[in-house]
């Protein structure tokens, strides 16, 4: 009984501290490279997403622990003392002292855990963190470690690319913005964690193939010739091949999202002119987010459009260029200001 009581008191305390500290870590963007304005990849990790009912169960365990502790205390004194006003007063004072002790211990442990999280934030993105923790704290360490590898390498690659030229800088910044939009769309439509991971990584890498396209073509102010446009149409394949080789992955969801993100639902896209049914969902999401950010971006060969203009164009060409349902969801989020603009 004593062991059950102690666990019941400890469990909700650790749950509360860990759960809320975890949210703070996410909000502050754990990884060092997010200090430069990158969107948190932790949105795509397998973190806990608990309902109010599940939270109530965790906290309810604590209430049970307090009740058990009170019962044990009163039982002990009831055996040794006659029930009296003095006993009831002592029992009540002891009960309040137990609650005060509980709160005090929670505060002390909270400070210690926050210190631990601070050290984790310093280590995150630099090395694998030994998972020596228990209960809910292990979720944070696991979330950090699963992104310390591929996400860190992808974002480090973009950081390296953007220093090469102004166009490379645009490619990197544009890719990070598109990845941000994609995550928010994916989260809204209820993609699973693995899908969100693949979507985020594919969006970050969807334009990497453009580093193989000459700047005189990418930045040409006049209309492209037939040969020049045929070169442009190869960049999704280049992005696909670079991702497959550099990250040694055979993940089809990731690779196909990159390869087919310039395909249109009416079959007029590139490089394969496939239509609606053949285009993977993740590629459709990237296509919409990519088009939106491209329209908002200033380019040497054209002026940027306003947010409202971009939304109007997306809606006008939904069902022909872009998936109508995804456009509807994305523009709804934009107009309701439920999506974070970067």
Image (cartoon, grey):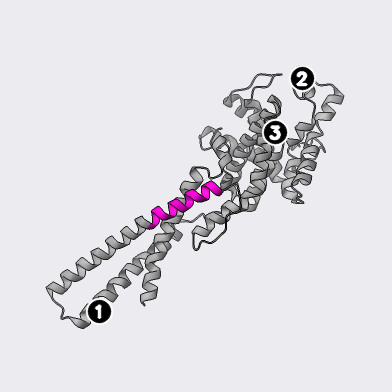
Kindly identify which residue carries mark 1. Answer: 76
> x, y percentage for residue 114?
43, 51
> x, y percentage for residue 263?
76, 37
In this view, the residue in front, 61 or 69, is 69
Stretch of the chain drawn in magenta? 109-123
Element type at mark 2: loop
Residue 166 disc label = none
In this view, the residue in front, 44 or 208, is 208
- Vertical relation: 23 (above or below) 315: below
Mark with earlier residue (2, 1): 1
| Residue 171 occupies quadrant | top right
Image quarter where the N terminus lies is bottom left
Q: Give the CA distance from mark 3 to mark 1.
A: 70 Å
In this view, the residue in front, 112 or 52, is 112
Mark with earlier residue (3, 2): 3
Residue drawn 74% across the image and 22% down it:
219
Residue 161 disc label = 3
Residue drawn 70% across the image and 26% down it:
165
Element type at mark 3: helix
The question of residue 111 being in magenta is answered with: yes
> x, y percentage for residue 308?
57, 26
Judged left or right of residue 186, residue 219 is: right
Element type at mark 1: helix
Mark with earlier residue (3, 1): 1
- Vertical relation: 84 (above or below) 258: below
Give the prevailing secondary structure in the magenta stretch. Answer: helix
Residue 220 disc label = 2
Q: Give the CA distance from mark 3 to mark 2.
A: 21 Å
């Amino acid at each position: 009984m004593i062991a059950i009581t102690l666990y019941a008191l400890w469990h909700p305390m650790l749950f509360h501290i860990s759960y809320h500290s975890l949210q703070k870590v996410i909000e502050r963007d754990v990884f060092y490279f997010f200090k430069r304005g990158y969107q948190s990849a932790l949105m795509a990790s397998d973190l806990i997403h608990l309902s109010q009912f599940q939270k109530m169960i965790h906290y309810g365990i604590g209430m049970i622990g307090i009740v058990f502790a009170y019962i044990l205390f009163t039982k002990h004194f009831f055996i040794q003392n006659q029930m009296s006003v003095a006993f009831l007063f002592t029992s009540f004072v002891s009960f309040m002292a137990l609650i005060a002790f509980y709160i005090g211990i929670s505060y002390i442990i909270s400070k210690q855990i926050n210190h631990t999280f601070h050290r984790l934030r310093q280590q995150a993105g630099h090395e694998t963190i030994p998972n020596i923790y228990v209960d809910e704290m292990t979720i944070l360490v696991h979330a950090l470690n699963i992104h310390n590898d591929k996400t860190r390498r992808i974002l480090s690659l973009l950081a390296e690319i953007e220093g090469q030229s102004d166009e490379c800088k645009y490619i990197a910044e544009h890719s990070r913005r598109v990845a941000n939009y994609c995550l928010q769309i994916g989260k809204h439509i209820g993609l699973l964690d693995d899908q969100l991971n693949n979507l985020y990584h594919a969006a970050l890498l969807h334009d990497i193939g453009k580093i193989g396209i000459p700047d005189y073509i990418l930045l040409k102010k006049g209309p492209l010739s037939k040969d020049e446009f045929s070169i442009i149409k190869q960049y999704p394949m280049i992005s696909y091949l670079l991702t497959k080789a550099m990250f040694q992955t055979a993940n089809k969801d990731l690779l196909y999202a990159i390869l087919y993100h310039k395909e249109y639902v009416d079959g007029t896209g590139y490089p394969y002119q496939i239509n609606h049914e053949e285009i993977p969902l993740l590629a459709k999401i990237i296509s919409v987010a990519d088009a939106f950010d491209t329209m908002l971006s200033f380019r040497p060969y054209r002026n940027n459009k306003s947010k409202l203009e971009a939304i109007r164009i997306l809606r006008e060409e939904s069902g022909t260029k872009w998936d109508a349902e995804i456009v509807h969801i994305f523009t709804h989020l934009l107009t309701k200001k439920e999506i974070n603009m970067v």
